[in-house]
Image (tube, grey):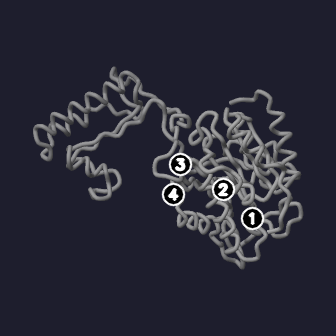
Amino acid sequence: MNEIAIESPLDKIQDVIENGTRYAFITGDSLNVLKKIPINSINCVITSPPYWNLREYDTNHFENSIGNESDYRDYIITLTNIFIEIHRIIKNDGSLWLNLGDKYYNKALMGIPWRVALSLMDKGWILRNDIIWDQMKGTQSAKDRLRDVYEHIFHFVKNKTYYYNHDEIRIEPIRKPKIYNGELVSATGVNGKKYRKQIAESNSLNELERKNANIALDEVLNDLAIGKIVDFRMTIRGEQRAFHSESTSISGRAKELESKGYYILKMGANGHLPSDIWRIAPEDTWRKDAHYAVFPEELIINPIKATCPDDGIVLDPFSGTGSAVAIAIKLGRRGIGIDISENYNKIAEERVKNLKNQLF
């Protein structure tokens, strides 16, 4: 890759990491800049690298820039080397969110996102989620296959234990408990009478298990009454099947059913976590002619809320017009953006300066 000048990255990066400066944009080759960032210093990385042979980006006319490789395998190697460096600089409880689109080549879908993901897993990254980004619309350039309207967002972590604030991204329940025929029922109409009858009539529970199951049912009904939960389901040995598998070596619920005779699933009043399908339109106000693949702001909010603590540092090594950094600032975090394009960084600087007090 051609060498390019870097705008005093060490001072800018140090100001964000050590001195509390809110943000910095660095013009330079991502790998070269990343090597200058201290180990274990970044909380969260959110990025979408240039796709392989798919889009045209402003890369200061560097023909060997990422995405222009003649062989997809070279593209995968290049990205892998970059994310090895990110593995070094990210904190032990940090997260990486990687968005990649696929590519058809000689009539074949290449599977580029998964080829990259598997390569990163081989290098020590732990894959926690494969999120399908449903863009809700797409073009139809071929007549012999279906329209492609989604991309992948992979959530990687460095260690099995990591920062994840699930309460920040919960979706409030649409349905709530209610009074029906004079008694309280859950959001889906569960009142516990069926479970009470099954416990009493069960031939699979011994007396102690039957007693404990009734106590547990009393407790969950009390949680429903005081508004701690909005819904629940009870599984009783011999009456219902374990949720995923009846094998105790595979399913923790099956093991619980075997040892206790029952288990209870609850839906908390504070809501449930989002699913791994996100329906978000790709356009936003910063989808300008200067850049053809701008992150929609909505796509970035939950990853930052969930995996970057307050005043933590979000890094985007392919920052483009600065979406990840801008949202990080809005959410009370700090941000570092790296891009090979001086033009994109100028747009990003303007964008962040115009934020003023637009905090979420």
Q: What secondary structure is found at the residue carrying circle 2? A: strand
Do tag 4 and tag 1 residues touch (Cβ < 8 Å)? no
Q: Say which residue appears at 55% left-offset and 56% top-offset.
A: 130
The numbered mark at residue 140 is 1
* Residue, disc 4: 126
Q: What secondary structure is found at the residue carrying circle 3? A: strand
Q: What secondary structure is found at the residue carrying circle 1? A: loop
Cα separation, mark 2 vs mark 1, equals 22 Å
* Residue, disc 2: 99
Q: What amino acid type is highlighted by mark number 3?
A: Asn
Q: What amino acid type is highlighted by mark number 4?
A: Ile
Q: Say which residue appears at 63% left-offset and 55% top-offset.
A: 86
Crowd band around label 1 with a 10 angstrom C-alpha radius: few (<14), some (14–19), many (20+): few
Cα separation, mark 4 vs mark 1, equals 35 Å
Crowd band around label 4 with a 10 angstrom C-alpha radius: few (<14), some (14–19), many (20+): some
* Disc number lying in front (4 or 2): 4
Which label's residue is closer to the chain start, 1 or 3? 3
Which label's residue is closer to the chain start, 4 or 1? 4
In the rendered image, residue 291, in percent from the top left (x then y), is placed at 83, 53
* Disc number lying in front (2 or 3): 3
Q: What amino acid type is highlighted by mark number 2?
A: Asn
Do tag 4 and tag 2 residues touch (Cβ < 8 Å)? no
The numbered mark at residue 92 is 3
Cα separation, mark 4 vs mark 3, equals 12 Å
- Quarter occupied by the C terminus: top right
Q: Say which residue appears at 34% left-offset and 34% top-offset.
A: 190
